[in-house]
Image (spheres, coloured by chain):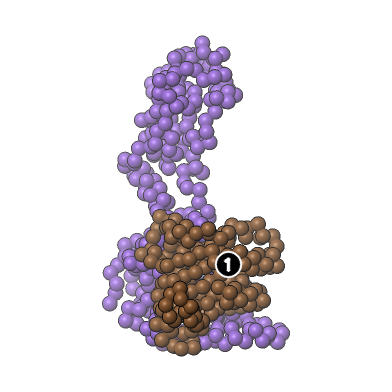
Amino acid sequence: MPDANDDDFRQVLSREHEALEKRRRRAAAGLETAPPKLRLALCATLLDKRDTGILLRALRETPSCALPEDLAHLRRIFKTPNDGPVKLLLCCSENPNDCTLPQGLEAMRDKLGDPEVIEIPESTPVSYEEARSWTMRYWPVNFIKSRAGLSLKPGLQVLDLTQSDRVQAGKYLRQVTALSASHQGKDAALIVEPNADVVVAKSLDTTTEEGHPLRHAAMNCINSTCARILQTRLSKQADAVPSPASAAGSRKRAKLDEEKHDSLAKETGDLENDDFPGFDPVNTYLCTGLDAYLSMEPCPMCAMALLHSRVRRVFYASPNPRRGALGSCARIHCHEQLNHHFQVFTCADPKPKES
Amino acid sequence: MRAALAEGEAALARREVPIGCVFVVRQGEENVAAEETVLTSGGNETNEEANATRHAEIVAIDRLFARVGPSAKDLLASSELFVTCEPCIMCAGALREVGVRKITFGCGNDKFGGCGSVITVDPDADLRAGLLADEAVSLLQKFYQRENPQSRDTLAAKFSAPSPSPTKVDQDVSADTLS
Ligand SMILES: [Zn+2]
Ligand SMILES: [Zn+2]
């Protein structure tokens, strides 16, 4: 059994987000990052440093000197090194040959040197390191943490797994890989309640056995989970009130799905019954709060089924370069247009499939 | 599409999101008075089953497999689908798995659509959009008005008005393409 420290996971982010994280890591390591997008601006030297306050107020109150919202990272003042002259950013500029003082600032003319056109970073820096390097090269910029990322919905953010998260994820990922390996490498899936630390459902791909092309491991596992939740809910209801006739059909199928699960649980020598300590099927909406572990990156059908089911996190062992929808061919879990997002992790360096 | 809408109506009566579908086999030449047989049909069962994957298309496919066994795959592969709303990404994936390429749908699905609205799951699918879309939308409106009156405004965002031409959905709107 590998050591818990071996459990290193890589979060699968959107392409855009991944590029941003890469840039952030490079900058933090002191490596060169792609140069910022530059734009033209007008600046002027302050003749007397004591006028700084007056000039800053004048710039604030002059509409033609206002900087657009997306340039909030730029500083107005540039104190040149070794106590050199102080320069002020007056306004954005469109014309490299136009050095006229901005309209409304005429009263300040005698406090400023001749305006000059310069290039300033239009891009927002993603780290302190990047801000520092741009400051030295172009014009002083601030690193503003709240602006440094993409505007991300909660489900799309980077999630740092805790040590206990890693231990748990490593345990179940090894379990699902072993389940796959002990069944001729068929895809396997687990759905886990993370707080109670219990397996809710366990499934294999049964497309061949059942002659049914939709019986992928993840679909089977979602069906088992929902069946178990429904089954418990219905039996609880039955205790209270006589069950409606409409529920009979779904109960029958729920029972079937559940039996399928139980036979696999028996086969793997790991019996789970209806009692999940710490897991409350009656109040669980779909798969909210549950984690899925897959031996193989899911196809679009399974990935979207997990999304519809509102799982919390998905961990998969091997990527599926041909049709994987959580990183390889698409990244459905972080598609901006979809209503639910979940975090996806895979092994930091995928090991070759165990045989 | 009338039969699919009827499945949608039935789903509405069960307090489900009213989306319905039929898989149809055509015999005889195209555009001639071909004989059409409904292979299988279904409506949403997500609430009843407490399972978010029980969409009309999946329900209909499962019904056929339950009835005829593995030979359902060959039957489906020669069938075409009529569904009131654009198949979601999951169902579009399922349709590709069972080899259904000819898909006609009513309204678009800007929230989950797997036939162009969000992503294109199967670039080889033969799509036709907008058939009886107004009726599909009004069916959905009935549901959201009854179940959740507050969300009426968001309905427009969920299910788009009929696409004027199917060419719109032929384009891949996403950077990610599934092949
Ligand atoms: Zn799948
Ligand atoms: Zn669907």
Q: Which chain is brown?
A: B
- On the rendered structure, is A140 left or right of B132? left
Q: Position of residue A230 (x, y in %)?
A: 59, 80
| Chain under numbered label 1 | B
Where the C terminus of chain B falls, by quadrant? bottom left
Q: Which residue is mark 1?
A: B132
What residue do we see at 42% from left, 67% from top?
A: B126
Q: Quadrant of residue B73?
A: bottom left
Above or below residue A268? Residue A332 is: above
Q: Position of residue A335 (x, y in %)?
A: 47, 58
Above or below residue A122? Residue A320 is: below
What residue do we see at 49% from left, 34% from top?
A: A71
Q: Does the closest atom of ligand 2 sit within 8 Å of the Cβ of label 1?
A: no
What residue do we see at 66% from left, 68% from top?
A: B143
Amino acid type, mark 1: Leu
Q: Quadrant of residue A325?
A: bottom left
* Front residue (pair B82, A286): B82
* Front residue (pair A146, A13): A13
What residue do we see at 55% from left, 78% from top?
A: B42
